[in-house]
């Protein structure tokens, strides 16, 4: 009888530990999924910001180079500041936007990690209550500078949390700049 009690007790403990492990693993997966979604979305935003600024600066530099080439060496030597590309404000704006986005990403990841930690501790303590996630500010509460420019259809789809498959389109490759 004692051996059966020990085996039964051990079986119950192992079963409880297995259920706890499965719960912890599920919470971990959900937390990882949320964190990855945040990082993916915000890294795309950073990339788009930086690419847009780089394109504007490149275009400005090309225009300044064409103007300098057209005007000739003497005019460029007389007033070189006229031929410097105008991209300082764009670069500074892209830098500030990137810093804001990285700060927001840090805050969101901190919230997700602390929420996951709270869920894990609740799971380990045996409580089935899940902590309520902190509410994100609605789009009307955002600052004007933080509002993103999106077409209305895409904004509505995002707001409705509808997952639509994205189509990849081939980009037109531009010819590399020629040196003459």
Image (spheres, rainbow, N blue to C red):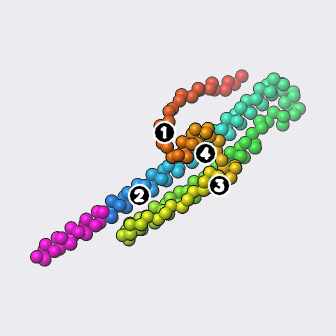
Mark 2 vs mark 3, CA separation in Å: 31 Å
Q: Is residue 126 above or below residue 84?
A: below
Q: Which mark is residue 141?
A: 3
Kindly report the distance in space between the C-alpha atoms of the residues bearing marks 4 and 3.
Answer: 22 Å
The earlier-in-sequence mark between 2 and 4 is 2
Q: Earlier in the sequence, mark 2 or mark 3?
A: 2
* Picture disc at residue 46: 4
Tags 2 and 3 touching, CB below 8 Å:
no
Q: Which residue is mark 2?
A: 28
Circle on res. 29:
none
Choose the circle earlier in sequence order: 2 or 1. Answer: 2
Q: Earlier in the sequence, mark 1 or mark 4?
A: 4
Secondary structure of the magenta portion, mostly?
helix
Residue 96 appears in view: no
Q: In this picture, which residue range is highlighted in magenta?
A: 1-19
Question: 68 or 44: which is nearer to us?
Answer: 44
Label 1, residues with CA under 10 Å away: few <14, some 14-19, many ≥20: few
The reply to whether the C-beta atoms of the residues labelled 2 and 1 are less than 8 Å apart is no
């Amino acid at each position: 009888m004692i051996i059966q009690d020990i085996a039964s007790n051990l079986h119950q403990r192992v079963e409880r530990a297995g259920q706890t492990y499965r719960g912890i693993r599920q919470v971990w997966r959900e937390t990882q999924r949320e964190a990855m979604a945040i990082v993916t979305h915000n890294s795309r935003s950073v990339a788009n910001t930086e690419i847009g600024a780089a394109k504007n600066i490149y275009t400005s530099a090309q225009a300044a180079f064409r103007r300098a080439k057209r005007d000739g060496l003497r005019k460029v030597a007389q007033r070189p500041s006229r031929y410097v590309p105008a991209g300082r404000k764009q670069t500074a704006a892209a830098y500030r936007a990137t810093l804001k986005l990285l700060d927001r990403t840090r805050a969101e990841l901190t919230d997700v990690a602390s929420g996951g930690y709270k869920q894990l501790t609740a799971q380990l303590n045996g409580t089935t209550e899940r902590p309520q996630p902190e509410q994100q500010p609605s789009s009307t509460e955002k600052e004007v500078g933080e509002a993103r420019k999106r077409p209305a259809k895409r904004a509505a789809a995002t707001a409705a949390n509808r997952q639509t498959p994205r189509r990849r389109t081939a980009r037109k490759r531009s010819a590399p700049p020629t040196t003459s």
